[in-house]
Image (cartoon, rainbow, N blue to C red):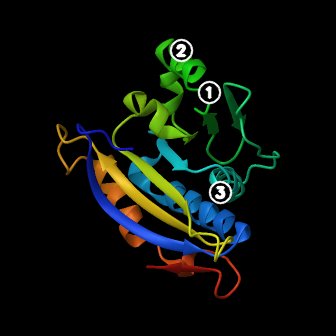
Amino acid sequence: MAGPEAAQAARRVFLSHSTEATEAFGAALARAIESAGALRGSGVALALDGDLGAGKTALARGVARGLGAADRVHSPSFTLMHTYAGRLPIYHFDAWMEGRERAFLEGGGAEWLESGGVALIEWASRVARWLPRPRLELRLEHMGAHDPQTRRLSLSAVLDPAAAAAEPRSQALQALVAQLRPEDVAAAPGQFEAL
């Protein structure tokens, strides 16, 4: 997902053994974003990538729940964007239909990605050129037919190499990734772990 012009800083890898654990991870991630003072008011883009059925929308449901949104969260594949009201506004994009999303982003929609809330972008690699830096990226991967419920979740802070790594938002995203622990995820015992 990170293009050659982006620099990946902090990176953590987790295993989720159920949809519920993936949602719980999303809620923990949302709470960490909300509590990071340097991110308040500036917005956070969370780029989500993974195969069909890897858990991108489940993660989005967890983020919305973690921010107190009462709305039913579903994939915005056939709309441009869904918005959800939580303690921070949530903007949920789906770039599956790349041409339509690209036209939306080029036409001013990219402003939503840094509008003071949390922007969730499913299939983010399809529109990587419009994604802001710094940002968070999460890659969700099936672990294979032998373990169909387990997903590898690779969380990264992606920085702009032209900006100072000491920039407050960059530092806050790196710290968020480095400090997120399995204990922060309210999942059933044995359902979520760090690698």
- Label 1 amino acid? Met
Please report whichever mark, 1 or 3, sits nearer to the chain's N-terminal start.
3
Residue 26 image-quadrant placement: bottom right
- Label 3 amino acid? Gly
Residue corresponding to mark 2:
103
Residue corresponding to mark 3:
55
What percent of the width, then of the height, locates residue 120? 57, 42
Helix, strand or loop status at disc 2: helix
Helix, strand or loop status at disc 3: loop
Residue 82 image-quadrant placement: top right
Please indicate, yes or no, whether residue 41 appears anywhere in the rendered image: no
Q: Residue furthest front?
A: 145
Residue 41 or 176: which is nearer the viewer? 176
Residue 45 or 74: which is nearer the viewer? 74
Q: Residue 21 vs residue 142: left or right?
A: right
Q: Are marks 1 and 3 in contact (CB under 8 Å)?
A: no
Q: Quadrant of the N terminus?
A: top left
Residue corresponding to mark 1:
97
Residue 167 or 181: which is nearer the viewer? 181
Please indicate, yes or no, whether residue 14 appears anywhere in the rendered image: yes
What percent of the width, then of the height, locates residue 129? 37, 29
- Label 2 amino acid? Ala
